[in-house]
Image (spheres, helix red, strand yellow):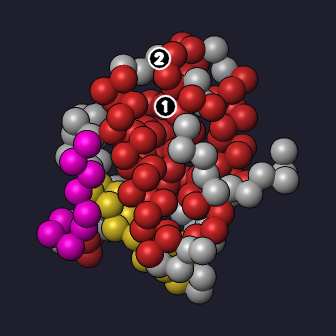
């Protein structure tokens, strides 16, 4: 499926989740949670310059920057919120360093494609959808088409 318009890295993650059974999906989500890097030290005290995603049950902060035509995200999600942090980790790995147009091509129903709607509550899914929406909006503002 290399003909997809969204980032190839994200496509690989989607395919891994599609092939997994529901129990494995939760384990995979927790792995992404543990592997997501913490906020860089220079941004630790700069939450006021980051956008908060209020729809998430946990405090989620987002900052996007563009460099050489590619978008880079910084996410601050507490480790005590492994579900949200895991999805943020997926987006971080799958979208970070992509061109704005590829990020904008990411399907809004990403969580459904990954089968997460079968293992997460609707309230959690609402927050995850909002986080993806904010990241796409940031990409558009930074140079998307």
Q: Earlier in the sequence, mark 1 or mark 2?
A: 1
Which label sits in the foreground, 1 or 2? 2
Check disc 1 and report the residue beneath it.
29
Q: Quadrant of the C terminus?
A: bottom right
- Rendered image quadrant of residue 64: bottom left
The residue under the point 60% across, 46% down is 107
Q: Which residues are magenta?
A: 47-55
Image spot of residue 95 (x, y percent): 56, 58
- 127 or 40: nearer the viewer: 127
Mark 2 nearby-residue class (10 Å; few <14, some 14–19, many ≥20): few
Q: Is residue 91 left or right of residue 4?
A: left
Q: Quadrant of the N terminus?
A: top right
Check disc 2 and report the residue beneath it.
119
- 123 or 71: nearer the viewer: 123
The residue under the point 21% across, 48% down is 54
Q: Is residue 86 left or right of residue 58?
A: right
Helix, strand or loop status at disc 1: helix
Q: Are marks 1 and 2 in contact (CB under 8 Å)?
A: yes
- 26 or 56: nearer the viewer: 56
């Amino acid at each position: 499926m290399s003909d997809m318009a969204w980032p190839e890295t994200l496509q690989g993650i989607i395919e891994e989740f599609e092939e997994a059974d529901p129990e494995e999906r939760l384990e995979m989500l927790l792995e992404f949670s543990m592997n997501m890097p913490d906020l860089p030290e220079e941004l630790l005290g700069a939450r006021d310059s980051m956008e908060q995603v209020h729809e998430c049950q946990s405090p989620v902060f987002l900052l996007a920057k563009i460099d050489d035509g590619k978008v880079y995200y910084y996410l601050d999600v507490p480790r005590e919120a492994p579900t949200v942090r895991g999805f943020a980790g997926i987006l971080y790995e799958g979208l970070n360093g992509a061109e704005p147009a590829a990020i904008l091509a990411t399907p809004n129903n990403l969580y459904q494609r990954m089968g997460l709607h079968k293992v997460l509550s609707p309230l959690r899914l609402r927050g995850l959808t909002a986080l993806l929406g904010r990241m796409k909006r940031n990409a558009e503002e930074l140079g998307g088409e």
